Image (spheres, rainbow, N blue to C red):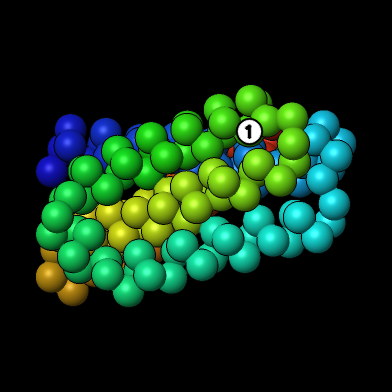
Amino acid sequence: DGAPSFFFFLALYLLSIGTALVEGLVFLFFVQDLGASNTLCGLSIIVTVVFELPIFSYSKKCLDTFGIQGLLIMAGVCYVTRVMAYTLFSDPWMVLSVEPLHGITFAFKQIAAVHYCAAIAPPGCETSAQGFKDVVVQLGVITGTFGGGA
């Protein structure tokens, strides 16, 4: 698949860098900059998971409707929107209004990545393709964590 695969994995890598940066530091931002409580931080996780679960349940419909590329693009847009919104809030409870975007980001990224790797893998190499995807994601996590100082 050449160039399309390169750009897909590059997008996955870059999204993983950003995600690691935010996930490593977001609760510090919530608590220190917005004055959030630990309870609010915990509720934010509940909100993200509540939105992830139905998306995974309807992953085939999402994939059929938006396609692999569309899902990855929407994951990136949701990520950027959520992170930019954090900077606009002065009330810590407002973070709950954008936390569903994390659920969409995570679910769409996972659905797109798993299905793309399954589609490009030669017969008998499906597991290796998923392993390669995970290596790319984890390299992004490592880069984001070290680069962000988390």
Foreground residue, 12 or 122? 12
Q: Residue at x 60, y 44 (%)?
A: 20
The amino acid type found where label 1 is placed reads Tyr
- Tell me residue 18's x, y (percent): 54, 36
Question: Where 56 sits versus 109, above or below?
Answer: below
Is residue 8 toward the left or the right of residue 50 in the image?
Answer: left
- Tell me residue 67's x, y (percent): 16, 51
Q: Residue at x 22, y 55 (%)?
A: 116
Q: Is residue 135 visible?
A: no
Q: Which residue is mark 1?
A: 86
Foreground residue, 59 or 6? 59
Is residue 41 toward the left or the right of residue 32 in the image?
Answer: left
Identify the element where label 1 is drawn.
helix
Q: Residue at x 82, y 32 (%)?
A: 33
- Disc 1 crowd rating (10 Å Cα; few below 14, some 14-19, many 20+) is many
- Tell me residue 26's x, y (percent): 71, 42
- Tell me residue 40's x, y (percent): 76, 55
Count of marks, rendered view: 1
Q: Is residue 73 visible?
A: yes
Foreground residue, 123 or 75? 75
Q: Quadrant of residue 6?
A: top left
**Quick one: quadrant of the C terminus?**
top right
Q: Residue at x 43, y 70 (%)?
A: 53
**Quick one: quadrant of the N terminus?**
top left
